[in-house]
Amino acid sequence: MAPKFIKEIVNRVVPASAFALSVARVVVHATFLISVLIASFSALGRLPITILRPTGAMRLLPWSFYDQLLTPAGMMILKLAMVVSLVAGMIGFLTPISTKTSFLLVLFYQGLLRSFGHFNHDEMLAVFCLAVLAFTPCGDEFSLDKRLRKNRRDRPAFAYAYPILLMQLLMAWTYFSSALIKLRVSGLTYLTQNNLPALAIYHSLDNLHDTSFRIAFWLPQIKEYLPFFVGLVLLWEFLFPVAVFFPRLRWLILGGGVIFHLSTLFLMNIFFPHQLALYLLFIDWDRFSSSRSEAPTDTIP
Amino acid sequence: MTRLHLKYAILTAAIFLPLIWAFVEIRNLYPVATWNVMMAGGLLERGRSYWILRGETVSGETIDIRPMSLTNAMYARTWTMVNATVDNQSFKLPHPHPANAELLRQAGGLEHLPPGARVPDLLRAWGDLYNERLPASSPQRLKAIRLDMYRWEGGSFANYDKFIESWRQNL
């Protein structure tokens, strides 16, 4: 028996069906599949290995391994392995295996990218969601495995509901802890007039960012209003857990998130598409399921 | 507690305990992340350097080149890759790549290494990638590629483009 308060929360805030967890599997795997398909791995393999700086756990691997991998051919093999694994994970084929291989391959690939550049956070939440999916029964519905299986698996609804809650809590943590850290490090000086324009202009000066929007140069003209805007963003980050626990307010918080991430794109040339894609985890997918009646019980007894 | 609940409790702890450690320490240790995004904000008084990648074509034009169009997998991390390369950060690892260790030995130590010791390698890779997309006879092919460094001294919202130096690589 799960603790009573956990069951009450789960019953109230997340769908408790195999279908809903399976859709989460599709969303997370498809997000990475798209980004892997559009990325040129062979071009990545042309970057000089002498500028690589293995970060964190990536230092456990020897240089001889990176020497072999960081070639156009080596990177194409990595891409092929990732595409096969992510497609299998997405369609739910050999799910207990493919979700784990997807997690490990994406974990390695994201570490490789961060070993060239900085530790940016866009994909990290999705990496943690892959970890959750790798160890939960996310292939019981909406999967090839289900079609190939003769006997239906009966599990308690909690087995499907809790992983969804866990992924939603992870997203809430990213925003909530981000707001706390800003106040820990900068205190109220974070709300000064020049903060946002200086940061936004810096990210608009070069041609090394993904986009070249120049709206940032207009911000100094309205800088007296910006502390209010920055304060509103901080408040929104603090309140993000509301999206998990109060479904009625969810769309207000998530709508604010879409506006926030689009704002950072146009003002700072910084975008978080992977994080935005994971907003789909907050949709009650059971509403769209024709087989909902076949799913295990909707509430946890 | 059933086996399922125990499994989920372990999964939750395995994910959240490292995240809480990273939050307390404000430290990213891959794959453990702390969401310290833009935590310091932008100090107007602080000067900042930035870079623009440019190419010199066979026809004599100077054109801006977006690295994102050459190595798009790096997405959102290109600017810090250049920053780190100019700062010779790959030479500051406890165990640098053997080729970097050899260059360090030849130079006589990190303090004798010029800034951006590996920038020419990066420029050559980008230049080759750019030219390979064009026919051999194209006047738009690059004969050289360069990384121009500028500095915004800060203190005011003006004078953003003080030229500092340039790295140039013939192709």
Image (tube, coloured by chain):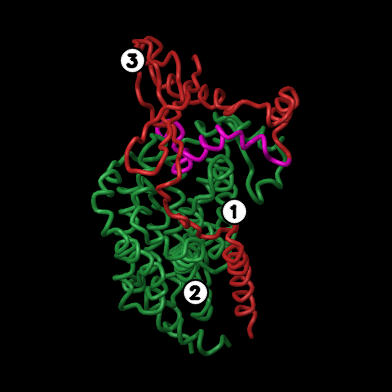
* Chain of the residue that carries numbered disc 1 in the rendered image: A
Q: Colour of chain A?
A: green
Q: Say which of A87 and A216 sits in front.
A: A216
Residue type at mark 2? Answer: Tyr
Q: Which residues are magenta?
A: B68-94
Q: Say which of B144 and B42 sits in front.
A: B42
Local packing at callout 2 (Cα closer than 10 Å; few below 14, some 14-19, many 20+) is many
Q: Are marks 1 and 2 in contact (CB under 8 Å)?
A: no
Local packing at callout 1 (Cα closer than 10 Å; few below 14, some 14-19, many 20+) is many
Residue type at mark 1? Answer: Thr
Is residue A105 in the magenta section?
Answer: no
Q: Is residue B83 above or below residue B120?
A: below
Helix, strand or loop at label 3? It is loop
Is residue B91 in the magenta section?
Answer: yes
Tag 1 and tag 2 share a subunit: yes
Tag 3 and tag 2 share a subunit: no
* Chain of the residue that carries numbered disc 2 in the rendered image: A
Q: Is residue A256 left or right of residue B3?
A: left
What residue is shown at x 30% (from left), y 46% (from top)? Answer: A216
Q: Which residue is labeled 2 in the image? A: A160
Please tell me in which quadrant of the rendered image residue A293 appears. bottom left
Q: Is residue A285 left or right of residue B113?
A: left
Q: Which residue is labeled 1 in the image? A: A101
Q: Colour of chain B?
A: red
Q: Which residue is labeled 3 in the image? A: B61
